[in-house]
Image (cartoon, rainbow, N blue to C red):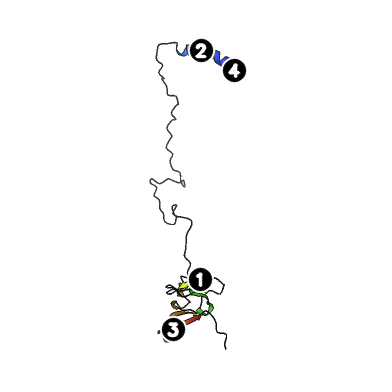
Amino acid sequence: MRVLSVFLTGLPLAALVACGGDKAVTPTAPMRPTPPPMAQATPEEGAMVPDEEYRYEPEGKTDPFESFITVKLRTDAEGASSPLERFDLSQLIVTGIIWQTNNARALVEDPAGKGYIVGVGAAIGKNKGKIIGIDDNRVLVKETYVDFHDQATTKEIEMHLYDTQGG
């Protein structure tokens, strides 16, 4: 409280002193003194001298605007683009067929038990086979491969929905 009373009594006194003359007050010296100019240093032996002009060389540096996340599509060594092209036809099992429609479909299961729905024209098998027909209990696959005489040979393979029980 004492500080407040000292401030309030000193405020009118400061106002009287500041308004005392008719002369305008002009500062004769700057508020901050300017620092003296620095002496030029001479390079000593072994000291690093900065280059006159900096040039950015991007070679060998990472691009700061490139995403850290990259997406790569996995393919097998043979270039298989679908999961069914990784297996031989003897490893695949036909487990279901929808055939009384304009667009027949078949359910094919891989050795791991995962099912895939395929239609006519789908790629299947390691030998780049194509499905050429789907009937009520079979899927017909056409494979083209190079035989031991270096000739392209075409073979049609039937994959049956039900194995015959013999008898």
Q: CA distance from mark 2 to mark 4?
A: 15 Å
Inter-mark Cα distance, 1 to 4: 88 Å
Q: Disc number at residue 12? A: 2
Residue at the image point whose x is 48% and y is 82% from the top? 158
Q: Residues within 10 Å of mark 2 (few under 14, many from 20)?
A: few
For the residues marked 1 and 2, what is the alpha-carbon distance in whole angstroms? 94 Å
Q: Position of residue 23 (x, y in %)?
A: 40, 12
Write down the residue under mark 3.
155
Asked whether the beta carbons under mark 4 and mark 3 sit within 8 Å of each other, the answer is no
**Who comes first in sequence, dot 1 or dot 4?**
4
Residues at marks 3 and 1 touching, judged by CB atoms closer than 8 Å: no
Which residue, given by chain and number where applicable, does mark 4 sit on? 3
Tag shown at residue 116: 1
Residue type of the residue flagged with mark 4: Val
Callout 1: SS: strand
Pick whichever of labels 3 and 1 is earlier in the sequence: 1
Is the Cβ of the residue at disc 2 closer than 8 Å to that at disc 4? no
Three-letter amino acid code at the position of disc 2: Pro
Asked which secondary structure carries label 2, the reply is helix
Mark 3: secondary structure: strand
| Vertical comparison of 6 with 91: above or below | above
Q: Is residue 96 above or below residue 155?
A: above
Please state which of the two labelled residues, at mark 4 or mark 3, is closer to the viewer: 3
Q: Position of residue 48 (x, y in %)?
A: 45, 46
